Amino acid sequence: MKDHPMSPLPRIVITGVGLTAPNGNSLAEFRANLLAGKARIAEIEVRHMGRQPVGVCDFDATRWQKRKEIRNGTRVGSISIWCAREALADSGLAWDSLDHSRVGVYLGITEHGNVETENEIHNISQFGNDTKYWTHHHNPRTVANNPAGEVTMNMGITGPHYTIGAACAAGNAGLIQAAQMLQLSEVDVAFAGGVSESIHTFGIFAGFKNQGALASHPDPTRASRPFDRDRNGIVISEGGAIYVLERLDDALARGARILAEIAGWCINSDATDAVLPNPDRQAECMRLALRRAGMKAADVHLVSTHATATALGDVQECKAVREVFAGCPGTFVNNTKSFIGHCMGAAGALELAGNLPSFTDGWVHPTINVGELDPECEVPGLVVNRPVKAPRIEAILNNSFGMLGINSALIVKKYGVA
Amino acid sequence: MTKEDIKKVVLDIITDIAPDEDLSAVKPEVRLRDQLSLDSMDFLDIVMELRKKHGIEVPEADYVQLASLDSCADYLLPKFQAKAGK
């Protein structure tokens, strides 16, 4: 196998982040709730499914959109615009003087269009299934580039935009795509991350339910419990996290605050099963990301797990993490879905965001809702129920896996660390 | 149903589909596009809402009749009356 060191290519850094999670509409709020152990999962009515535990975001879309934009667009379009606008504000970029044709938008999605199609099927069912009542907004709402396209229209971005369909590995995939486009000099600034509106499609709930993978618990805030012996599945959530990425030289030239450097990545495929994860390929994915970053496993101080609280998935990932990080006493392991559920296309991007402040505050937020740790999920360094102050956090490996056997691992490091 | 009733029906639809617009001073004789920020998709929304809420069909060849509130009233009045007479 050939090495593909990143050193000859431009270094890529994160200079802004905007997000909406069920428990926070800014990185500061999100981080504070993660360190305080505050989950936020509601129980809401889902069409045809009854009441379900769901992660719902409560950002004010009218801050950045006209009401007509909100009406004609999609929920995930609004999530994307919120995140991109907030990321821009966070980055300090001089937007008005920037060449907008050199800006790209790359957003990871698990799926898109189910929500809008289900809504129209429901709509025409009220009219005897006569398709003349099917909305003309359906196609612009359901084209796969919709979330990224809505961002460009709202912000006047004339560079490239598209989404990256990567199941629940999508958040990492959006960032990886953007880093590559910046390295190729296709763009000078990238808005990249992952987004999801999947709580509004009953089909996702029904699919997981009939797969035996949909969470339930009398207390919705305890429903998402990765690694717990009694975990019983996924809490579906909406959300988004979009980052501003730039080449390091550009960021330094404008005196930008650098939140982190993209150090390495890997996306690979199990090629074994549509839904069952493969720990061998997951471990390989992490190792290849380390290799690209030119790092050893011990150089990673925090592994952000993907675990979704399914019976098998958590065990498989723990097996892979144990293997890759064996003999790494300085490596902590955590999980964010226990607070916010599974934000699908946004999961990887949001979970990375929740951990980024550890570079400066030195804390590792825990995975919560663990009543009794599943012995098969015991991993050295796993931070359970209470945050831990780490001696140092200088590199984070962010796992994000998805159906059809797509694995992604993204490594970011504290800027300025060799 | 009077022409004034029909103008109110159309304005109520526009309130829903163009919620950012100030409709307090819409001139009935002036083209809607010349005084409001409405595009072709919005006019399709007006057609759809007439269909869904009032059972009124506007064939594509007649879309031009929806240009102003006055022309809407003139064009739609017989349709509403025919529907009421059924």
Image (tube, coloured by chain):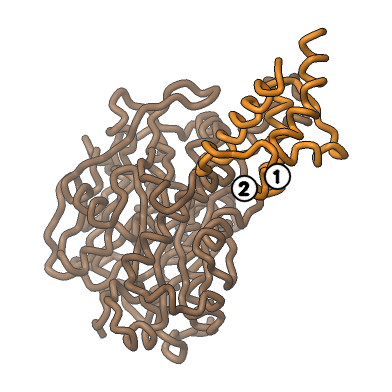
Q: Is residue A74 above or below residue A363?
A: above
Left or right, residue A398 beside residue A132: left
Q: Quadrant of residue A371?
A: top left
The amino acid pointed to by label 1 is Arg
Q: Quadrant of residue B83?
A: top right
Q: Nearer the viewer, residue A257 or B74?
A: B74
The residue identified by callout 1 is B31
Badge 2 element: helix
Q: Residue at x 61, y 35 (%)?
A: B14
On the image, the x and y values in percent for residue A225 come to 31, 38
Q: Are marks 1 and 2 in contact (CB under 8 Å)?
A: yes
Q: Is residue A282 above or below residue A118?
A: below
Subunit bearing disc 2: B
The residue identified by callout 2 is B35
On the image, the x and y values in percent for residue B64 come to 81, 41
On the image, the x and y values in percent for residue A240 come to 42, 52
Question: Badge 1: how crowded within 10 Å, few (<14), some, or many (20+)?
Answer: some
Q: Residue furthest top?
A: B86
